[in-house]
Every structure is written in structure tokens, then in C-alpha cells.
Image (cartoon, grey):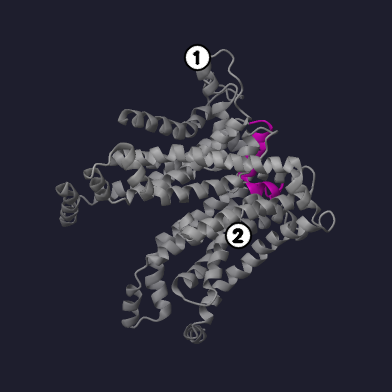
């Protein structure tokens, strides 16, 4: 039984890892047709990506749209989250549902709506149209992440500052914002990624002028499967990997540099770690 | 400025609404209005009436596509469960180091865009790709093409949605009180009966969460079925896109979109009745 489970586990891990791993060697392949094993290796498709206007422009569009979406989303969601987490008021339940709605509606449904609505507003094929649409789609996840952070906020700190004579504004700037900064950064990151990865709505409304990277990739995969896609996939994959291990690397560095610090903290952690084993 | 702000704060009823107002207006203008436009188009294009719905709900092509969509979503959910449950169990049972490695892999997969993962499956299953190559090396003569079939799109969707399932089940498993398992063992439960009577009920919330999430996302899936699936066995989202892009049949496309939306909302409503929607995505 145990052996069977272990092999099942290995098979599942391979199933999950294989698609992530395969694009990396393919991006260095000289073959234009995704041949395996690759007949040879070169950096030609990387060069092509970084020099080809038809790939660089969508990349730039995507970065710009994601950045503007992030700014707009944060400007709208941060105050709303404060209202929903810290205040009780009539209609709060409905407001909560409204914040989550864009997540429950399939993107294809919204794509049809935006295609027609922005068509009548003359916003199809424009950066602004995509930004406005992406902001709606980014609201729920940004709100979820931020509200989780705000719920865990220890409000006694604010009260302490108030009792020491700080004005509400001073409390907000010197206490609330600095403590909340990691949460704000993470929710902004979620908004950015939501927009950067969004494909379906962008396919329908971004057009030639505001073409985003996912739209360009989608079209290219559908038509000819340009090997440059393997390059972009690898680059995106590396970006995700770096983003995920960055906190671990930072922690490692901190550990290395704080070796000289006193160690009572570690001692207590050790005793905590041993208690469950003693029970055993 | 400070004076007005503080007086507003004292009038507590107004302040939260003031904070909420910009977003509420924004969502009304750029979320509710386009959504309403879909509903309106479905009964006005090309002429007023319920003809579009009649077509969508009774036409054999549309019924086939919707049934196919449900069947695929159900199949993908079951496969995700079959992949996710054992892996979550093993992550919980194995050393912490290994569990962390697997968790890193799953998060990596989760954060890699749908499009990139779909493309990766195209590379893997392509006619000159590694899977065919492997089959030929093992000794299969002339293996059949797997790409652009129902199989390839289902496989890719399972891969893309499995992280949702795994994370949900794993987080529930981690919270299980070990002493419950031990006491069950001390009373003579082991193997399958321990699993059925203790482990499975304790992990049921994670299974429900993961399944609903996977099923709902799969219902509206556009990218992967369009790129990897068979053109003859479209899913609902693909057909909606087709109606809009190729035929400019806004009314018909909108009616299908509304049916898809209603079904999705029904699934979510049943779920939220029982568990509360806020837990689903948290």
C-alpha cells in the first residue's frame, strides 16, 4: 500500500512538473517545429524576441496596462476595503457580494459585454478600454488579499497612538500605513498579475492597437505556433520562479547576517518544537 | 479639510459609504452595465423576443455543447480530485522538506499563466513532441495523434486546475488534529475504514471547496479548449466566442453567455447556502 502510494505520488509530481520543465529546453532549440529531442541548441529565438517589434510592442502594452490597472484598482479598492472591514453599516452584505461578483462571472461573458459596450463608447482597441475592464476583474482578488491583511491588523496599536495624542491623520500615516505596507504590496502584485495574465477579455477588446502579450501569444499559438512563444513562456516561468524563491533567499541572507544576534528566541522555538514529540 | 473630515467621521453612517462610493460607481459603470448589455442583447438581437433562448435551449447543437461542457467540467473535477487528494495526503505524510518542495512546485504551476501551461501541453503532446517520441522509443508503431482531441484538452485542464484542488485539500488536511487519528487507531480502525470514517469526513470541506472552484472555472474555460480541444467538440465558452467573432451573432452569443452565467451562479449559490461564499476563494 505504502509503496503504491509513493509511486502514485511520484507520477503526480511528474505530471505537474513536466509541462513546466519542457518549455525550457524547447526555447533553446534550433527546430522551428517543436521537435523532440531538439536537433540543436542556440539563442536565436531569444534574439528574435528581443528585437522583433511585433513581440516587443505587446509586451510593452501588457506592462503598461497592468501597471495602470494596478494603480486604478488600488485607488478604488483600498478605501472600500477599509469601509468593509472596519465599519458596520446598512447594505454591507450587498456591498460584499458586489465586490466578489466579477470573480463569479465567467470571463467570456464579460468579454461579450465589453465588446459591445466599449464598442458603443468607442473604447474598443484602446489601452483605456482594456485598463477599465481589467480593473473590474482585478477587484475581487485584490480585495480578498487586502481584507485578509486588514482583518489581522492589531487595532490597539492605533488606539495607543491616539491616546498619546496623535491625530487620526497622523495615526493613519505613521501607524496604519507602515504596518499595512506588506499587505498593500502583495495585493497590488495580485492586481498586476491578474491583468498581465488576463487573456479572454483582451482577445476580444484589445485589437491591434492595444494588443496585449497574452492576446498576441494566443493568436500566434492558434495560427503558426511561433517558437518565440517557448522563449516567452520560459521567461515568464523564470519570473514566477524568482518571485517565489525571492522571500526564501532574503530570509537566508538575513539569517547569515544576523548570526551574531543573541539566541534566546531560538531556544524557545526549540522547546516548542520538541513538545509534540514528547507527547508521542 | 480636517474639520469636515472629522465631522464626517462622527456621522458614522456616511463615512463608510463615502469610502465605498468610488468603487461602487465604478463597478456599476464598468461591470454591471456591460453585464446588463449582454442580457439585453440576448432578447433584442437581431429582433426582440425570446427566439435566441429558444434556439439555445432546444437546438440540438447548442444542447450538445452545453451537455459536453458539463460532462467535461465534471470529468475534470473528478480527475483533479484523483490527482489532488493522494498528493495532498502524501505531502502531509512525508518529511517537511519534501512537502515544501512539492508545495513550491504547485505554487509555481499555479502562478504560471493558463496560456503558458496550455502551450506547454501543446509542446508535450505535439506530433514531434516528447510523448510521441517516448511512445515510439518504447516500441509503439505510428502512435495516433493526441493533440486537438478531447483527451488533450481535458488533460491540460486537469493540470491547470489541479493546484486549486491540491491547495484546498492540503490546507484542510494540515489542520486535522492528529490525536483524532490516533484515537481512531486505538479503537481498532485501520486502513480503508480509518480513511472512510475518519479521514474522509474530516477532509470533506476541502474536497467541496476545491471541487466547486474547479467545476466553476472549468464551465467558463475559454483558452485551453479552444487551443487544445477538438474543433468538433467545442465547449460553451468556445462556441460563444465563435458566435461573436465569426458570425457576429451577438444575440445568440449573449443568450448562451447568460445561460452559462446562470448555471455558474446556481452552482455557486448552492455552495454558498451550505458553506458561505467568502470561504471559497480565501
Q: Magenta residues: mostly which secondary structure?
A: helix
Label 1 Cα crowd, 10 Å radius (few <14 / some 14-19 / many 20+): few
Residue ID for mark 2: A136
- Residue A49 is left or right of residue B199, and the answer is right
> What x and y, as percent, mark residue B276?
48, 60
Quickly name the residue at label 1: B137
Vertical position of residue B63 compared to residue B139: above or below? below
Which residue is rendered at x = 59% and y = 14% of the image?
B142
Is residue A83 or residue A223 the one in the foreground? A83
Q: Which region of the structure is painted magenta?
A: A200-225
State left or right for residue A237 relative to residue A203.
Answer: left
Specify whether residue A208 is painted magenta.
Answer: yes
Q: Secondary structure at mark 1?
A: helix
Q: Nearer the viewer, mark 2 or mark 1?
A: 1
Q: Quadrant of residue A2?
A: top left
Q: State which chain disc 2 sits on.
A: A
Residue A216 in sight in this render? no
Residue A95 sits in which quadrant? bottom right
Evaluate whether label 2 is on the same chain as label 1.
no
Q: Residue at x 61, y 32 (%)?
A: B150
SS category of the residue bearing label 2: helix
Where residue B47 appears, x then y in whole percent? 85, 56
Amino acid at each position: 500500500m505504502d509503496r503504491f502510494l509513493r509511486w502514485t505520488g511520484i507520477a503526480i509530481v511528474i505530471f505537474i512538473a513536466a509541462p513546466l520543465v519542457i518549455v525550457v529546453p524547447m526555447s533553446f532549440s534550433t527546430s522551428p517545429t517543436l521537435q523532440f529531442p531538439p536537433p540543436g541548441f542556440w539563442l536565436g529565438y531569444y534574439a528574435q524576441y528581443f528585437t522583433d517589434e511585433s513581440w516587443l510592442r505587446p509586451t510593452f502594452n501588457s506592462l503598461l496596462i497592468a501597471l495602470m490597472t494596478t494603480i486604478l484598482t488600488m485607488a478604488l479598492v483600498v478605501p472600500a476595503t477599509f469601509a468593509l472591514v472596519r465599519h458596520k453599516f446598512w447594505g454591507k452584505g450587498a456591498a460584499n457580494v458586489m465586490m466578489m461578483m466579477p470573480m463569479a462571472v465567467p470571463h467570456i461573458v464579460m468579454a461579450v459585454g465589453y465588446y459591445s459596450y466599449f464598442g458603443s463608447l468607442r473604447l474598443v482597441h484602446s489601452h483605456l478600454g482594456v485598463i477599465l475592464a481589467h480593473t473590474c476583474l482585478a477587484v475581487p482578488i485584490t480585495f480578498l488579499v487586502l481584507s485578509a491583511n486588514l482583518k489581522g491588523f492589531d487595532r490597539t496599536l492605533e488606539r495607543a497612538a491616539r491616546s498619546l495624542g496623535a491625530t487620526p491623520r497622523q495615526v493613519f500615516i505613521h501607524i496604519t500605513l507602515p504596518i499595512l505596507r506588506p499587505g498593500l504590496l502583495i495585493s497590488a502584485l495580485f492586481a498586476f498579475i491578474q491583468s498581465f495574465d488576463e487573456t479572454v477579455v483582451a482577445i476580444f477588446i484589445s485589437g491591434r492597437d492595444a494588443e496585449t502579450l497574452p492576446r498576441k501569444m494566443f493568436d500566434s499559438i492558434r495560427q503558426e505556433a511561433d517558437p518565440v512563444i517557448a522563449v516567452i513562456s520560459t521567461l515568464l516561468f523564470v519570473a514566477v520562479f524568482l518571485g517565489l524563491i525571492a522571500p526564501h533567499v532574503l530570509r537566508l541572507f538575513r539569517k547569515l547576517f544576523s548570526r551574531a544576534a543573541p539566541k534566546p528566541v531560538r531556544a524557545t522555538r526549540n522547546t516548542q518544537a520538541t513538545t509534540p514529540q514528547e507527547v508521542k | 479639510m480636517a474639520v469636515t473630515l472629522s465631522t464626517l467621521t462622527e456621522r458614522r453612517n456616511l463615512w463608510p459609504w463615502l469610502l465605498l462610493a468610488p468603487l461602487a460607481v465604478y463597478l456599476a459603470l464598468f461591470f454591471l452595465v456591460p453585464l446588463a448589455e449582454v442580457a439585453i442583447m440576448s432578447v433584442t438581437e437581431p429582433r426582440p423576443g425570446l427566439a435566441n433562448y429558444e434556439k439555445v435551449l432546444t437546438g440540438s447543437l447548442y444542447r450538445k455543447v452545453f451537455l459536453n461542457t458539463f460532462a467535461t467540467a465534471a470529468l475534470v473535477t473528478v480527475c483533479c480530485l484523483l490527482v489532488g487528494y493522494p498528493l495532498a495526503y502524501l505531502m502531509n505524510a512525508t518529511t517537511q522538506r519534501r512537502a515544501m518542495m512539492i508545495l513550491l512546485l504547485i505554487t509555481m504551476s499555479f502562478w504560471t499563466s493558463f496560456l503558458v501551461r496550455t502551450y506547454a501541453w501543446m509542446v508535450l503532446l505535439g506530433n514531434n513532441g516528447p510523448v510521441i517520441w517516448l511512445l515510439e522509443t518504447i516500441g509503439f508503431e505510428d502512435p495516433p495523434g493526441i493533440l486537438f482531441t478531447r483527451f488533450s484538452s481535458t488533460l491540460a485542464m486537469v493540470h491547470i486546475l489541479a493546484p486549486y484542488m491540491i491547495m484546498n485539500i492540503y490546507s484542510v488536511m494540515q489542520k486535522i488534529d492528529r490525536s483524532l487519528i490516533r484515537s481512531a487507531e486505538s479503537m481498532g480502525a485501520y486502513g480503508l475504514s480509518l480513511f472512510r470514517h475518519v479521514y474522509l469526513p474530516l477532509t470533506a470541506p476541502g474536497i467541496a471547496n476545491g471541487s466547486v472552484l474547479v467545476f466553476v472555472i472549468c464551465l467558463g474555460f475559454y483558452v485551453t479548449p479552444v487551443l487544445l480541444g477538438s474543433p468538433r467538440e467545442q465547449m460553451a465558452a468556445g462556441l460563444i466566442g465563435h458566435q461573436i467573432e465569426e458570425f457576429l451573432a451577438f444575440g445568440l452569443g449573449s443568450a448562451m453567455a447568460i445561460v452559462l452565467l446562470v448555471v455558474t451562479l446556481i452552482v455557486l449559490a448552492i455552495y454558498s447556502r451550505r458553506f458561505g461564499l467568502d470561504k471559497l476563494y480565501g
